Structure formats: C-alpha cells, structure tokens
Amino acid sequence: MTRWGALVVGCLLLTAACGGGSDGAGDAATTGSGVPDTAAILQGVTKDPQLAAGLPAPVAQAGKLNIGSNMQSAPNNFYSADGKTPVGFEVDIAKAVAAKLGLTVQHTDMAFGSLITSLQSGRLDLTMAGMNDTQARQQQIDFVDYFTSGITIMVRKGNPDGITGPDSLCGNTVAVVQGTSHQTFAAEQSAKCVQAGKPEVTTTATDSDSQNQNQLRTGRVAAILNDLPTAAYVSKNAGGGEFFEVVPGEPINGGPYGIGVNKANPQLRDAVAAALRALVDDGTYGRILDAWGVKQGAITKVTVNAGS
C-alpha cells in the first residue's frame, strides 16, 4: 500500500494537533498515537557471528539491508510523529533481523505495486510491506514468512451501510490499495455477485490507505478492504476509536506475510530466515508483536515460500 506525505502521517499520529481531523475530503484520517516504545527489546538483540557469516559478501560489506516498504500501513509500517522515522511491528522485526546479522536497516518508501520489480532489478535487498506470500508471487520472488493475516472489512462507525460480510458488498463501493490482494479479492467477489444475479462490487483503487480512509469517512465508499492488523489498529485509534469499526468474522483468504528476496539471492534469503528463526526461538519476535498488540498473527515456525 503506498505512500502518503510526511505531514499527513504526522496528522495521523497527532490527532489533537491536527484538530482530530475534519470531514473534508482533503484531510487525512487520524489514527491516534498507538506507538509502543520497543527500544529496550531491540537493544537486547546482539549479532550472531555464525549467522552473519552466511551473508552474501556485497550485503556484509555494505553493512546494511535496503528494505523496500510502503510506509502508510499502521501498525505494520508507517511514519512517526516527525513524519520521517519509520515505525511499526514490521519495522521492528526488520531491525531485529538486521541486528542479529550485524547490519543496520535503510527503508526505501515506494508504491506497493513497485516493490517486486524494484527487488528484481536489484534496487532493494528485501521487501517488507504486509505482502502476502502467494504462489503467483513466488514465480517472481522468494519469501521468508514472518506473520499470518487475512483480509478484513472496515466500515464507518455504526456500520450505516449494513455491511456484514463479503456477500453484502454486492451493489456497494469499496476502496482498496492498488496492486494488493485486496483488489484481487474485490474483483473476485464482484464476479460472484454478478453470478448470483446481484449488483457488482464497484472498486476504487488508490495508492494510499489514507485516501481510502478519507473516502470512507465522507461516505464515498461503503467499506475498505484491508489486512486485519491494519484495520484493527486504525479502528482502535482513528478519532479515538469513533471513526471506524471492523466487520466481525474470520479473516478472508488468510495466509502468511513474506519478506521478499530476489530469487537470484538464495544466500541472503537463507541468512534472513536463520536470523528470524533465532528471534522466534529466543522470544524477541513474540515480544515485538506483543508490544504492538498483534500477537494473534504470530508464527511458531519460520518457513520459506509457504503461501498458497
């Protein structure tokens, strides 16, 4: 999902400073602060020389991992109140993996739809942006799986359009981020509606969750399709919890998030997987997810290309 501006994110994190947000179409939705202090957890991660020895020479020499992301998807990855510091549970996991390998992290912010091609071209070392590990994407890149999620439906507080699940999207307009599995699901659900003799689902695809939230708040769409952790976080924090709510039910098309790695670089893939495995085993991984309130998506076993 793609980038909003630094000012927008500052408003997302500082509800009071931005007047709590207005109903104007140009204003970003607010998410409140909701940023835990994970510094002590990350400071406890130390380099494992044996794991670091498995890194490809160019990465080891660079001393850092250039990770492509899409900094507008709280609590996965977004900007802090200063509008420039990446935060989120994915950001913390990335820092911990890098520290275990004796590296630092540089985040490159870009449109979600550009992540895979940027990885394939060598512009990035890794991607980490709430990207579902799917068999279709495995044809392009490899994945080290680090979290389990699924699609959920977010509506305005009070659910004025009466959205109760996928079938009730028929005849309604939904917002998605361009190039995501949410967009694919919306098209599939629309086809099901038509086959059942119901009106199609109208989909609005943007490059930003913030745009989608504005559309939902102003009634231009009936719902947003998003991943469970993001929808739960935004619903809890936006407008002090008064703007949105999540439609109850099991996540749709549940599956793993994956750290993307160029298929031409299996050595880096295996080093990242080993570092993540060490963090799972020593409890660091679980403490990070706990701090962000997303432990329901925790994995117990690190896998590679396990998505379907």
Image (cartoon, rainbow, N blue to C red):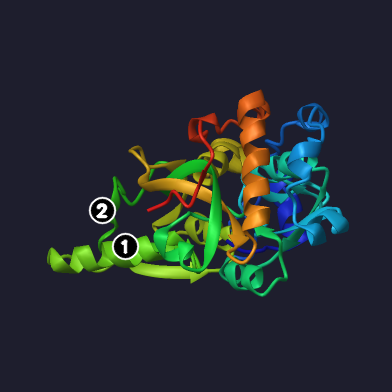
Give left or right: position of 48 versus 237: right
Instruction: Please tell me whether mark 2 sits on a helix, a strand or a loop.
Output: helix
Q: Please rate how many residues cluster around mark 2, counting C-alpha atoms within 10 Å: few if below 14, some from 14 to 19, many from 20.
A: some
Query: Pointer 2: what residue?
Result: 168
Q: Position of residue 250 (x, y in %)?
A: 34, 39
Callout 2 amino acid: Ser
Q: Position of residue 20 (x, y in %)?
A: 67, 46
Residue drawn at 83 percent across, 30 percent down: 43
Callout 1 amino acid: Asn
Q: CA distance from mark 2 to mark 1?
A: 8 Å
Query: Pointer 1: what residue?
Result: 172
Front residue (pair 136, 293): 136
Q: Please rate how many residues cluster around mark 1, counting C-alpha atoms within 10 Å: few if below 14, some from 14 to 19, many from 20.
A: some
Q: Is residue 24 visible?
A: no
Residue 201, compared with residue 72, is above or below; it is below
Whether pointer 2 and pointer 1 mark residues with C-beta atoms closer than 8 Å, the reply is yes
Residue 131, compared with residue 300, is above or below; it is below
Q: Is residue 230 visible?
A: yes
Give left or right: position of 38 versus 139: right
Residue drawn at 46 percent across, 67 percent down: 139
Q: Quadrant of the N terminus?
A: bottom right
